[in-house]
Image (tube, rainbow, N blue to C red):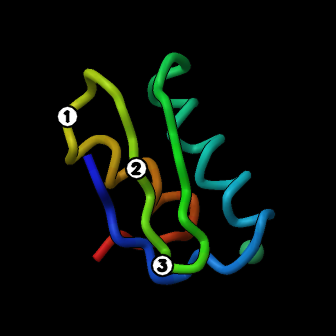
């Protein structure tokens, strides 16, 4: 899934978002495009759960 996360601005944000997704699914594959503020997640978990995990880390998904 591809998610737009406007608050992502640097490597620290990437780390926070990555940890949030990994707390939901340790096996998730995550790729973050900082410039375009897009997070690509490969996981079996539902998109709603991934969105919630990222949002609760302080990064709302639009
Ligand atoms: Cu940052």
Residue 16 place in picture, x, y as percent? 69, 54
Residue 57 lies, with reference to residue 25, above or below; the image says: below
Question: What residue sits right under mark 1 in the picture?
Answer: 46
Q: In which quarter of the image is residue 19?
A: top right
Rounded to the nearest angstrom, the CA distance separating label 3 from label 2 is 11 Å
SS for dot 3: loop
Q: Quick one: which residue is furthest to the top in this view?
A: 27
Residue 8 place in picture, x, y as percent? 59, 75
Q: Which of 41 and 20 is in front in this view?
A: 41
Chain-order first, disc 2 or disc 1? 2
Q: Nearer the viewer, residue 47 or 53?
A: 47
Question: What residue sits right under mark 2 in the picture?
Answer: 40
SS for dot 2: strand
Q: Which residue is drawn at 39% across and 41% down?
A: 41
Q: Which residue is drawn at 56% across and 69% down?
A: 58
Which callout, 2 or 1, points to the residue nearer the camera? 2
Query: Dividing the image into 4 quarters, which one contains the C terminus?
Result: bottom left
Q: Is 17 placed left or right of 1 in the picture? A: right
- Dot 2 and dot 1 residues touching (CB under 8 Å): no
Q: Quadrant of residue 32?
A: bottom right
Q: State yes or no: Cβ of the residue under disc 3 lies below 8 Å from any atom of ligand 1.
A: no
For disc 1, the neighbor class at 10 Å (few under 14, some 14 to 19, many from 20) is few
- Residue 62 is tagged as none
Residue 26 place in picture, x, y as percent? 55, 19
- Dot 3 and dot 2 residues touching (CB under 8 Å): no
For disc 3, the neighbor class at 10 Å (few under 14, some 14 to 19, many from 20) is few
Which callout, 1 or 3, points to the residue nearer the camera? 3
- Residue 36 is tagged as 3
Residue 54 place in picture, x, y as percent? 46, 55
Q: Quadrant of ligand 1?
A: bottom right
Residue 14 lies, with reference to residue 45, above or below; the image says: below
SS for dot 1: loop
């Amino acid at each position: 899934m591809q998610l737009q996360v406007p608050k992502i601005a640097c490597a620290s944000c990437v780390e926070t978002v990555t940890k949030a997704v990994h707390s939901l699914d340790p096996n998730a594959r995550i790729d973050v495009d900082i410039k375009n503020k897009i997070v690509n997640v490969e996981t079996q978990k539902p998109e709603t759960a991934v969105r919630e995990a990222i949002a609760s880390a302080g990064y709302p998904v639009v």
